[in-house]
Amino acid sequence: MDKGWIKIHRQMQEHWIWNDSEKLKAWLGILLLANHETKKVEMRDGLVSIRRGQFVTSIDKLAERWKWSKNRVYRFLSLLESDGMVQRKANRYRTTITVVNYSKFQDRQNTNGTTNESPNESTDGSPNGSRTRKNKNEKEILVENGTT
């Protein structure tokens, strides 16, 4: 989970969170913690499917990570939830945080705003038929006439 990247739209500079560097850092931390693909995780209460855009944590773990009080973490998550940025679901073993609209902002998109059909390959429109292939971490590799 510590490899890869996330997209950040320039429009974020106009969002209320931009004006508070600690909250902005925490928000970016949430985006970095969110799964980029769905996976199953064994938890204390059984096997749990954590979807793309979600992660499992606790208020205690976030407080430790951000060096905040538990009350401050709770208030921040409540603020994000009231603004429609995250959803929380908690039980006695864990808190699952879902980043609302994760796919809308993190999916790879064409310049016309549509999501590419193929997750592995796209054509760059060059006259010689060059293609750009992308690996699982979306690193671009130029392929000229079938060679890498």
Image (cartoon, rainbow, N blue to C red):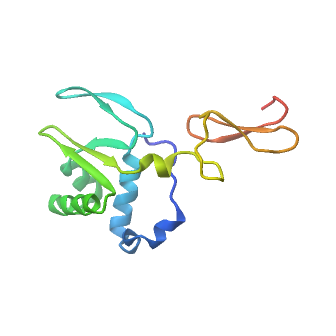
Residue at left offset 15%, top offset 37%: 93
Q: Position of residue 118 (x, y in %)?
A: 62, 33
**Which residue occupies the foreground of this view, 121 or 24?**
121
Q: Position of residue 32 (x, y in %)?
A: 41, 49
- Asked if residue 139 lies left or right of residue 59, the reply is right
- Asked if residue 47 lies left or right of residue 115, the reply is left
**Which residue occupies the foreground of this view, 110 or 144?**
110
Residue at left offset 29%, top offset 60%: 80
Residue at left offset 37%, top offset 72%: 16
Of the 4 image quadrants, the one containing the N terminus is top left
In the image, farthest residue toward the left? 92
Q: Which quadrant would residue 49 be assigned to in this image?
A: top left
Using the image, determine if residue 44 lies above or below residue 97.
Answer: above
In the image, farthest residue toward the right? 128
Q: Position of residue 83 (x, y in %)?
A: 30, 63
In the image, farthest residue toward the bottom? 19
- Asked if residue 4 lies left or right of residue 38, the reply is right
Q: Position of residue 61 (x, y in %)?
A: 23, 48
**Which residue occupies the foreground of this view, 51 or 139?**
51
Using the image, determine if residue 94 lies above or below residue 69.
Answer: above
